[in-house]
């Protein structure tokens, strides 16, 4: 039986996106820009190279699209669409830490590295964060630079700013010492 990878284009408030899923799980969230396409093609070829991409909605893509629409409208804070993350052991450790960051909370890349067991590995944690194939659903937009600055995001900094603002972060105020709600995943 032919394995299929279903694709659905969606319109986000900050630009076009595409969702990819098997019959079992969401496998990739793409921000439509040239840089993201290269990363997506590499990932899908590596982990789903035996699948045929079809531009057709399945039940999982319909669910994911509904949930994103509700999230973008400020009506949903958590996702129930099943997704799968495939990567190295370290990437999966970092991605599991990212998954534990609740809506409306942020951490720094340094805190993420520490939580992943690599206190000196801020750059490694950042690279793993950048390789996250399920952006928004696995909320890598909630990771900030050491000075709580906006850094690195596959969808671009405008999209990251939009997502954090949606979740209630006073980004402009924070540059001048405003309060930020920072979550500790160190338990």
Image (tube, helix red, strand yellow):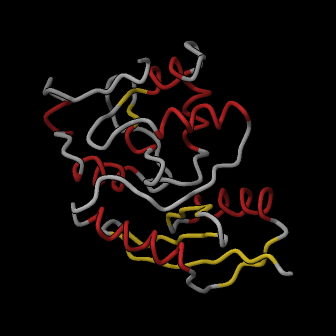
Residue at 40% x, 29% y is 145
Count of residue discs? 0
Relative to 149, is 155 above or below? below
Q: Name the spot of residue 19 as percent of width and height, x first.
A: 54, 70
* Front position in the image: 149 or 72: 72
Q: Within the image, what quadrant is residue 25 found in? A: bottom right
Residue 87 lies left or right of residue 179; in this view the side is right
**Residue 126: where, in percent of width, then height?**
54, 33
| Residue depicted at 22% across the width and 29% down the height | 181
Q: Where is residue 6 shown, x and y percent of the image?
A: 64, 77
Quarter of the image with the C terminus is: top left
Instruction: Residue 136: name its quadrant.
Output: bottom left
Name the one closer to the observer, 60 or 172: 60
Residue drawn at x 31%, y 28% is 148
On screen, residue 93 versus residue 179, left or right, reads right
Residue 109 % position (x, y): 46, 27
**Residue nearer the viewer, 116 or 162:** 116
- The residue furthest bottom is 56
Residue sitting at 36 percent across and 70 percent down?
12
Q: In which quarter of the image is the N terminus?
A: bottom right
The image quadrant of residue 144 is top left
């Amino acid at each position: 039986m032919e394995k299929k990878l279903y694709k659905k284009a969606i319109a986000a408030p900050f630009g076009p996106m595409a969702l990819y899923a098997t019959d079992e799980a969401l496998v990739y969230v793409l921000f439509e820009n040239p840089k993201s396409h290269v990363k997506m093609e590499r990932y899908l070829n590596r982990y789903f190279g035996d699948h045929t991409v079809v531009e057709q909605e399945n039940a999982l893509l319909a669910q994911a699209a509904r949930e994103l629409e509700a999230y973008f409208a400020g009506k949903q804070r958590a996702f129930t669409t099943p997704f799968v993350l495939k990567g190295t052991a370290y990437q999966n450790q970092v991605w599991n830490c990212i998954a534990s960051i609740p809506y409306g909370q942020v951490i720094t890349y340094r805190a993420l590295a520490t939580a992943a067991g690599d206190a000196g590995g801020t750059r490694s944690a950042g690279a793993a964060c950048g390789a996250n194939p399920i952006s928004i659903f696995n909320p890598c937009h909630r990771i900030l630079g050491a000075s709580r600055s906006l850094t690195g995001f596959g969808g671009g900094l405008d999209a990251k700013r939009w997502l954090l603002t949606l979740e209630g972060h006073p980004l402009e105020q924070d540059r001048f010492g405003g309060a930020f709600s920072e979550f500790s995943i160190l338990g």
